[in-house]
Amino acid sequence: MIDLNTSNPRLQILLSLILTLVVGLLWYKTKMWLVPAVFVVTPLVLIALLRFPFYIVITFIIFSYFRIHEAFPVLIPLHIPLAFSLASFFVLGWHIFLSNKIKIYWSTELTLVCLFLGWATFGIMFAYNKAAAFSTFSGVLSKVWVMTIAICWLVRTIHHFRIATYLYVVAGVMVGLKAISNKLQGIGLVEGTRVTISRDIGSLIGDPNDLSLVLMFPMSFTLSNLLQPKIGKFHRALLAVAYVILFWAIIATQSRGGLMGIMAVTGFFAFKRIKNKIYILAGGAMLLPILLVMAGVSDRSSGGAAEGGVDESAMGRIYAWMAAWGMAVNNPFTGVGINNFYLNYYFFSPHWDGKNHAVHSTWFQVLAETGFVGLGLLITLITLLFRRLWRTEVESRVLPINERNTIVTCNDGIFAGLIAFCVAGTFLTQGFTWPLYILLSMTVALAKILSERLADEDLTKVVKDAAN
């Protein structure tokens, strides 16, 4: 590759003349003023892309996960997620193969996620409806797979992490404010009371349960930043406002899984900061009924106070989980195939009410669609992630206090988000969508950044002593 910074000046002049001649000829032939404008702007855009690869990938994450373009439909024609996914691949390829500014690496977690997603892909060959399974793979799973690895390699400094956590909070607040606005105006409500966003266009956040899980992610980072020991009062006030907005929006979904997620996130931070654990248990016992009353769960048309005994919503989940178990027993190795639970509900459900149902559980979704092997790989992967997060916190203890606080804040946000995913995911179907895989990427990237920092200071021996 020619380096124009060190090339002969005559070569630079020659290339400039050739480019000018090409632009002039195109302009002469087309008579369009847009042609020279594109030639001028395109190099500037490419330079910007190559100089700021992190911002490309973080924009893609935010739009893909938070569905900003669906919350504000005016952005849909711009195809922002697609544009930034292509830009991410271009930037990643350039810096790996040409500039060598990004060093690729691997980890046990990446091996496990590739095995898990690879097994789900392998199961397409044995799916009941291969077309539905392949559609999910090509439309969602393949992008999640590639971008999971790309995020690990593009998030390269602790500064990137700090920016990412605040951008997640800002994006969450934007979605939260939209949800609150819809609630107050009575727009897109499910069952008359449960808030959604862009339900009419089939958005992911058009389901109140999925919306609550999307908001749980920024809530984790809001709390982790809010509870930092050394931040300014104005900074802390802004984070407190963000927390109230996210809390209100999750409450407005009336999702019992979302309420359990709030309990899990709050409990994690309480567990780290309150020495007497009895207070935590007592506080949790008091908080849950308060949340149920605040959310107005008893007013829901399904799962509300009007239904005696085990309500219809709960029984629907039980029937769905029984169907998932039946699918796994009938297909223990590969399951019925990704995106095939709904299509096979009729054949395996012990209770047929005239229509198919979603599984409403990440664990049972994975069990039904990838078999016992897939569920085993997922549980192993999540166990390794928790272990990696714990080790990251332990190893960071040898760093200077400012650096340690930054890493622990990021680590706590990921840890709380992963706990919320596991708890809320028990009632929500999120096995092959973004939440888990973004948390995985950030876990791996943060561990890599810390290991490089420790290597720079030659603190390996100190870390081993601290771990022991």
Image (cartoon, grey):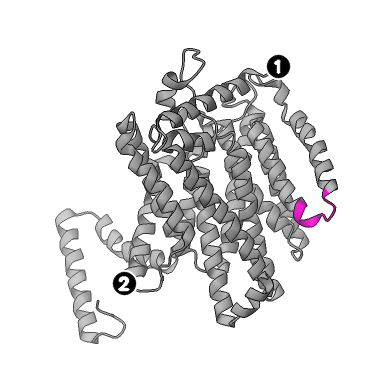
Q: Residue furthest top?
A: 354
Disc marking residue 98: 2
Of the two numbered discs 1 and 2 in the rendering, the one whose residue sits closer to the viewer? 1
Disc marking residue 235: none
Quadrant of the image containing the C terminus: bottom right
Q: Position of residue 231 (x, y in %)?
A: 74, 64
Q: Which of the two labelled residues, at mark 1 and mark 2, occupies the earlier sequence position?
A: 2
Q: Residue at x 73, y 61 (%)?
A: 228
Q: Residue at x 69, y 67 (%)?
A: 405
Q: Which residue is mark 1?
A: 309
Inter-mark Cα distance, 1 to 2: 65 Å
Instruction: Say which amino acid is labelled 2.
Output: Leu
Magenta-drawn stretch contains 171: no
- Above-or-below relation of 158 to 327: below
Magenta-drawn stretch contains 276: yes
Instruction: Count numbered badges in the picture.
Output: 2
Residue nearest the observer in this picture, 413 or 415: 415
Whether residue 178 can be seen here:
no
294 lies left or right of 29: right
Instruction: Say which amino acid is labelled 1.
Output: Gly
Whether residue 461 can be seen here:
yes
Q: Secondary structure at mark 1?
A: loop
Magenta residue span? 271-277
Q: Position of residue 235 (x, y in %)?
A: 72, 59
Q: Is there a contact, CB below 8 Å, between mark 1 and mark 2?
A: no
Q: Position of residue 342 (x, y in %)?
A: 44, 26
Q: Secondary structure at mark 2?
A: loop
- Above-or-below relation of 126 to 1: above
Q: Residue at x 75, y 56 (%)?
A: 272
